[in-house]
């Protein structure tokens, strides 16, 4: 969902109020009457929009910074990067997140996700990992919400050094469930010149429980720290069954609409 959706809704509210709230039609006390349902409708819409939105922020990295994603290892907000004669561009907008498998203590890497080394290894068929880079962010979701993201894996190595990228979903403080996104083996052998670039690909997964999930994206070397892979991530969102809910509405919308709703309620009470 784009950030523009919520302001469009608020514009519709404004237009509707203009039609229903007849200017010049004076009520008791000289105030202009308005339909009793309008302030309630506005409050309901405000509440509904705040409840329907999960709290995942900066999923497209268009703020130009990684915040509020947390990170370990080498990660950067990138517009593009040349790999020899080829180039990876951000998938949409100007920026994407690029994770490069760097050298990072394995114990810190796995403990962040509440897993052990064997679990990380099992996400790629038992290959020993050499961390790595990791980003994560927590979001409040409703059971059945869909996590969607775009990924692009850049493989610089050859087998048996099966470097890989993964995503993880952690419900509350449980162990993180890891899923491999891609590896040296899945994207195929290196060409004569340059790395293998998978290309941008969409991945979706349903989040089965209501509560707080922490979403992880990571990339690691296999066996040794050499010829590190890159994982690019863009357009991370969490959408609900009832419509897009991945982004918190523009703060300006609430700043403008909340006092208006309160003023309308007070005015209605004074008038009645
Ligand atoms: Ca982007």
Image (spheres, rainbow, N blue to C red):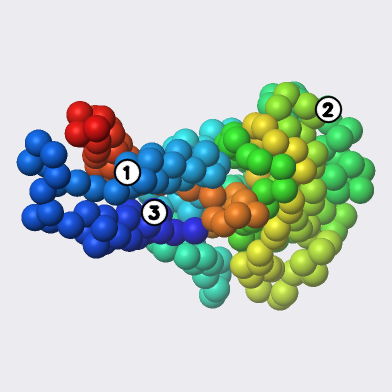
Label 2, ligand 1: CB separation under 8 Å: no
Q: Residue at x 70, y 36 (%)?
A: 210
Residue 150: mark in rendering = none
Answer left or right for 147 relative to 255: right
Q: CA distance from mark 3 to mark 1?
A: 24 Å
Residue under pointer 3: 6
Count how many numbered circles sit on residues in the image. Answer: 3
Q: Residue at x 79, y 48 (%)?
A: 179
Q: Nearer the viewer, residue 208 or 42?
A: 42
Q: Residue at x 18, y 57 (%)?
A: 22
Q: Residue at x 29, y 48 (%)?
A: 35
Q: CA distance from mark 3 to mark 2?
A: 42 Å
Residue under pointer 2: 116
Q: Position of residue 77 (x, y in %)?
A: 46, 49
Q: Quadrant of the C terminus?
A: top left
Task: Indicate which disc, 3 or 1, sits on the residue closer to the N terminus.
Answer: 3
Query: Is the residue under label 1 in contact with that under label 2 (CB below 8 Å)?
Result: no
Q: Residues within 10 Å of mark 2 (few under 14, many from 20)?
A: some
Task: Indicate which disc, 3 or 2, sits on the residue closer to the N terminus.
Answer: 3
Q: Nearer the viewer, residue 161 or 53?
A: 53
Residue depth check, mark 3 versus mark 2: number of the one nearer the observer = 3
Task: Indicate which disc, 2 or 1, sits on the residue closer to the N terminus.
Answer: 1
Q: Position of residue 129 (x, y in %)?
A: 80, 40
Label 3, ligand 1: CB separation under 8 Å: no
Residue 36: mark in rendering = 1
């Amino acid at each position: 969902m784009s950030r523009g959706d919520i302001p469009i809704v608020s514009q519709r509210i404004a237009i509707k109020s203009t039609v229903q709230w007849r200017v010049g039609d004076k009520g008791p006390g000289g105030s202009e009457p308005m339909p009793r349902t309008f302030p309630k409708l506005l409050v309901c819409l405000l509440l509904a929009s705040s409840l329907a939105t999960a709290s995942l922020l900066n999923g497209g990295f268009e703020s130009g910074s990684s915040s509020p994603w947390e990170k370990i290892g080498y990660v950067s907000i990138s517009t593009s990067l040349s790999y020899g004669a080829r180039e990876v561009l951000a998938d949409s907008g100007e920026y994407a997140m690029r994770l490069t498998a760097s050298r990072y203590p394995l114990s810190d890497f796995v403990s962040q996700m509440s897993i052990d080394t064997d679990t990380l290894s099992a996400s790629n068929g038992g290959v020993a990992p050499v961390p790595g880079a990791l980003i994560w962010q927590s979001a409040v979701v409703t059971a059945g919400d869909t996590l969607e993201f775009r990924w692009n894996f850049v493989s610089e190595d050859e087998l048996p050094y099966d470097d890989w990228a993964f995503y993880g979903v952690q419900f509350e403080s449980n162990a993180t469930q890891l899923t491999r996104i891609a590896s040296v083996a899945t994207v195929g052998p290196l060409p004569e010149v340059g790395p293998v670039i998978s290309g941008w690909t969409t991945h979706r997964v349903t989040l089965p429980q209501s509560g707080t999930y922490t979403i992880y994206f990571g990339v690691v070397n296999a066996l040794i720290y050499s010829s590190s892979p890159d994982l690019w991530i863009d357009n991370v969102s969490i959408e609900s069954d009832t419509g897009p809910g991945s982004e918190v509405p523009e703060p300006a919308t609430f700043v403008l609409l909340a006092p208006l709703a309160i003023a309308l309620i007070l005015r209605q009470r004074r008038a009645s």
